[in-house]
Amino acid sequence: MKKKVIIANWKMNHDFYETTSYLRNLLKIIYENKIHHKKKIIIAPSFPFLHISNQILQGTTLSIAAQNIHQMENGSYTGEVSASMLRSIGIKKVILGHSERRKYFTETNDILIKKIKISLKYGFHIIFCIGETGIDRKKEEHFFTVKKQLEKTIFHFSLEKINSFIIAYEPIWAIGTGNTASPEVVQLMHQYIRSLFLNKYGETVSNDLSILYGGSINDMNARDLFLQKDIDGGLVGNSSLQMKNFLKIIQS
Ligand code: PGA
């Protein structure tokens, strides 16, 4: 049985004190309630707190992910953070392809390929986000959009690299809007995504692949989503900011 993966994407939220106290409290409750073996829990805080966060979770079953990585090795890219810098503080996971980065920081598929390459070179596990816009869905082009996103990014990589990926299906119309996609809608898309991996890489890869859902997950809808056959967990934004809510989602 694959373990469910629950990721908290804090985006540009939580200062030093909020980050460290959240993590210490979360750890305590998760271990007291013995849920640390049952789920894979990953937290993605902001860059300045990755080091301390990683130290707090050291030796536990929880882990830390970065929210971004720059596509170049190093050099004159003011304000950017490289893969080797993150590895030097022990970070081994990164979120790439998030729709907010595609939209506000114009991350194209070509840039994403470079980001994937450098992340793989430094041994990162990649949580890769894909998902259609509301317009795509209205036009019934959602399957096509998702297929194209995969073909133009991950599908450039060979079979041996694919176990470094977790897919997060995040329909853009559902992110931060309160409009969660229904479990049936998500299940259909996840089944489709798995079939694309089956055709491209074969049965073992497609069976082993974790496909998470993201987009207005909360403690009320998480359980029904996670019960679906092809939903292997969630990428949680807003509802991960309060520890109480996030814990309820983990326990769903
Ligand atoms: P949300 O964000 O849960 O606030 O919709 C999800 C995400 O952007 O990963």
Image (spheres, rainbow, N blue to C red):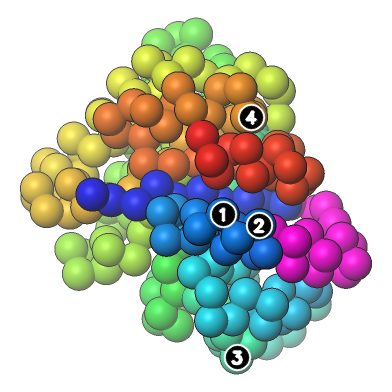
* Distance in Å between CA atoms under marks 1 and 3: 32 Å
* SS class, disc 1: loop
- Extreme residue in the bottom direction: 88
Q: Earlier in the sequence, mark 4 or mark 2?
A: 2
Whether residue 195 appears in magenta in the rendering, the answer is: no
Q: Mark 2 points at which residue?
A: 29
- Which residue occupies the foreground of this view, 85 or 110? 85
In the rendered structure, are the residues bearing label 1 and label 3 in contact, judged by CB atoms less than 8 Å apart? no
Any part of residue 10 in sight: yes
In the rendered structure, are the residues bearing label 1 and label 4 in contact, judged by CB atoms less than 8 Å apart? no
* Stretch in magenta: 11-26
Q: Mark number for residue 33?
A: 1
Location of residue 43 in the rendering, given as x and y in whole percent from the top left corner: 62, 59
Q: State which mark lies toward you, 4 or 2.
A: 2
In the rendered structure, are the residues bearing label 1 and label 2 in contact, judged by CB atoms less than 8 Å apart? yes
In the rendered structure, are the residues bearing label 4 and label 2 in contact, judged by CB atoms less than 8 Å apart? no
Q: Which of marks 1 and 4 is nearer the N terminus?
A: 1
* Distance in Å between CA atoms under marks 2 and 3: 29 Å
* SS class, disc 2: helix
Residue at the spot x=17%, y=54% of the render?
205
Q: Name the residue under label 4.
A: 218
- Extreme residue in the front direction: 32
Task: Decide: few, some or many residues near mark 1? Use Cα within 10 Å; few <14, some 14-19, many ≥20.
Answer: few
Residue at mark 4: C-beta within 8 A of ligand 1? yes
